Image: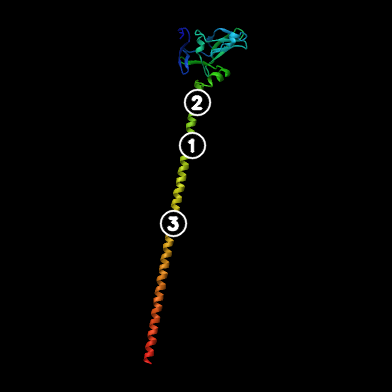
Amino acid sequence: MPASTSAKPYRIGRSKTGLGLFATQPIKKGVKIVQYFGPLLDSKNEKHDAIENKYLFQISKRWTVDGSIRKNIARYINHACKPNAESDVNATKKRIIIRSIKKIEPGEEINYDYGTEYFKEYLKPIGCKCDACEKKRKKKRAEARAEKLKAKEKAERKALKKEEKAKAKRAKDKAKKAKASGKAKTTKAAAKKTSAATKAKSTKSRSAKASKAKTGKARSKAA
C-alpha cells in the first residue's frame, strides 16, 4: 500500500468498499486535493484500446488515463452519488485533478461521482455502497418493514372483525334457537292445557249424561 506523507491532507485507509482516501486535516471548498494520473492510452493504438480495467479514466474520445498504477493515490478515491469532490478534466493538457466541492472535515472520506457509464457498468450490478445509496436502501427497508407491519395489522383487524361477526352470528343463532325452543315449549304447554280441558269437559259431559240417565231410570221405577 502506498504511504502518504504528512504534508498531504489525506491518507489511505479502510472504507466500506475496501480502501479509500480520507482527509487528515480540514480541506476547504474548491481546493486541489490530488492528481489522477497514469500512462496515457491512445484509442487509435490497438494494444492500448485492448486494455481494460476499472481504473481507466477517459479524458477525450482519443485519450484515456490508465490509473491502475500504485503511485496513483487518486485511484483509492471511491465513488459517491452525493460527493464532496469532483474530477476536473483538462483535455488539452491531458490532466485530471480531483478538487473539493465542499468543506471536508478530518476523518471524512474523500469521494467523487464516477459518472453514469461507470456506475451502470461496475457499480449498479453489485449495488452502490456510498452513504447516499445506503441511506436510500435503509429508508426502503424501513418502508418495506412498515408496509409489512401495516399489512399484518390490517389482516389482524380483518380476522378480528370476522371473528366478531361469527361470534355475533353464533349469539344470534343461539337466541333464535332459544326463542324457538321457548315457543315450542309454550305451544306444547298450551296443547297440554287444551287437552286437559277437553278431557275434563269430556269427563264432565259423561258424568252429566250418567246422572241424567240415572234420574230417568229412577223416575221410570217410581211410575
Q: Which mark is residue 137?
A: 2
Pointer 1: what residue? 151
**Whether residue 103 can be seen here:** no
- Secondary structure at numbered mark 2: helix
- Is there a contact, CB below 8 Å, between mark 2 and mark 1? no
- Secondary structure at numbered mark 3: helix
Q: Which mark is residue 63?
A: none
Q: Check disc 3 and give the amino acid type.
A: Lys
Residue sitting at 39 percent across and 77 percent down? Answer: 204
Nearer-N-terminus badge (1/3):
1
Nearer-N-terminus badge (2/1):
2
User: In which quadrant is the N terminus drawn?
Assistant: top left
Q: Residues within 10 Å of mark 3 (few under 14, many from 20)?
A: few
Q: Residues within 10 Å of mark 2 (few under 14, many from 20)?
A: some
User: In which quadrant is the C terminus drawn?
Assistant: bottom left
Distance between the alpha carbons at the discs numbered 2 and 1: 21 Å
- Taking depth in this image into account, of 147 and 223 the one nearest to the observer is 223
Left or right of residue 219, residue 71 in this image: right
**Whether residue 134 can be seen here:** yes
Q: Check disc 1 and give the amino acid type.
A: Ala
Position in image of residue 179 (x %, y %): 44, 58
- Secondary structure at numbered mark 1: helix
Residue 184 lies, with reference to residue 151, above or below; the image says below
Q: Check disc 2 and give the amino acid type.
A: Arg
Pointer 3: what residue? 177
Position in image of residue 162 (x %, y %): 47, 45
Residue sitting at 40 percent across and 81 percent down? Answer: 209
